[in-house]
Amino acid sequence: MENRTGHSEENIRAQNIRPIEDSVRTDFSQAMSYGGYLDLDRLLTSQHPLSTPEHHDELLFIIQHQTSELWLKLVLHELLEARRLLDADNLAKALKCIARVKAIQRTMTEQWSVLGTLTPREYSEFRRFLGSSSGFQSHQYRAVEFLLGNKNRDMLRVFESDPAAHSQLSTLLEEPTLYDAFLAVLARAGYAVAAEILERDTSEPWTFRKDLVPVFQEIYESEATPWGFYEACEDLVDIEDNFHAWRFRHLRTVQRTIGFKVGTGGSSGVDFLKRALDLTFFPELYAVRTEIGN
Ligand code: HEM
Ligand SMILES: N[C@@H](CC(=O)c1ccccc1NC=O)C(=O)O
């Protein structure tokens, strides 16, 4: 029996080939194609190893970073939308964005296993070609940190020679964080979030607010808590846990690759990265755990 490809099923099986169907489009001189839509010409010619002679493993290093930056772009896009939706009291839709962010974070953390195949010797063979460039100069990473509450005005100095990045980060430094937006939702819903919190200087890093712990205790313990509020709290904890896991995998990858060498960005390296593990986005959501059941 002949099918839409003009080949018999028996022939297909015997030849171990999947003939393309007659209806499949093959002429893209006038029509939109895959590569055209995705701008693959630009994407796939944007890897420029600098080592001479070219080191085989530099492509891995570049692609690991470029894919991370693409995911960070989407994380930022989703977090900005989540904040906008919270401002509009659309909690359910905001949680959809946050669910996507959490899935991307898990992918980004697992992605360290690819770079884990780079040995210290291989990396040392092309490291000098990286000059003073460093992940410390990732403006998208800093933007995500700012949006989640790790504000740090000093970080802007790194971007003085990049006006677009500088301007995006200055805006995010001033604007409320995702947490600020969520606390405002809670306040509008009648929870006792202090006015001082709602009117805080949002360009400052978030610091622990003891008076928020009973608010979260009520959310966690009361049978009457609307599902979305409880879920949102747990999602924020997931985001912080996931972020911490990424930072930890980065630290361990750095340690196994360059040991205790100073970083190309000028920092002490592992020691400097270790201090980032003490940073927190939503400290009250962790503090409330101690109180639950008391
Ligand atoms: C062999 C691979 C890597 C090594 C040896 C390494 C090393 C380092 C070091 C030493 C620093 C501290 C800043 C400095 O002085 O340079 C740093 C910061 C940073 N790196 Fe990497 N890194 C690696 C891979 C990556 C990858 C794949 C990313 C993904 C985007 C990344 C993103 C960052 C970020 C965002 C920072 C700033 C962290 C902070 O401020 O706490 N790194 N890295
Ligand atoms: N800071 C790294 C270099 C490095 O990892 C890097 C260099 C250029 C672009 C991104 C990088 N990734 C993370 O810091 C080092 O000290 O070896």
Image (tube, grey):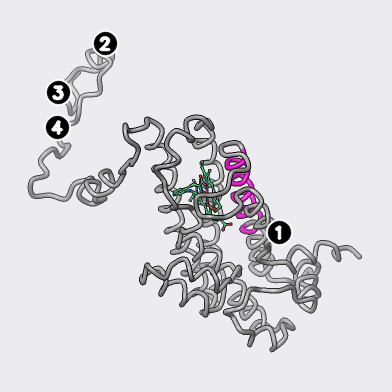
The local crowd at label 1, few if under 14, some if 14 to 19, many if 20 or more residues have their Cα within 10 Å, is few
Mark 1 or 4, closer to the camera? 1
Foreground: 5 or 42?
42
Q: Amino acid at mark 3?
A: Gly
Q: Amino acid at mark 4?
A: Asp
Q: Furthest-top residue in view?
A: 14
Q: Which mark is residue 22?
A: 4
Decide: marks 1, 3 in contact (CB < 8 A)? no
At mark 3, the secondary structure is loop
Q: Is residue 193 left or right of residue 131?
A: right
Magenta part of the chain: 239-255
Q: Is residue 232 left or right of residue 264?
A: right
Q: Which mark is residue 6?
A: 3
Q: Amino acid at mark 2?
A: Ala
Q: Amino acid at mark 1?
A: Asp
Nearest to N terminus: mark 1 or mark 4: 4
Task: Name the residue rendered at 52%, 72% in the picture.
Answer: 83
Name the residue beneath numbered marker 1.
278
Decide: marks 3, 4 in contact (CB < 8 A)? yes
Name the residue beneath numbered marker 2.
14
Report which quarter residue 53 is drawn in: top left
At mark 1, the secondary structure is loop
- Measured in 3D between alpha carbons, the distance from the residue under mark 3 to the one under mark 4, in whole angstroms, is 8 Å
Foreground: 14 or 146?
146
Mark 1 or 3, closer to the camera? 1
Nearest to N terminus: mark 1 or mark 3: 3
Q: x%, y% of residue 55?
A: 37, 32
Q: x%, y% of residue 155?
A: 53, 68
Nearest to N terminus: mark 3 or mark 2: 3
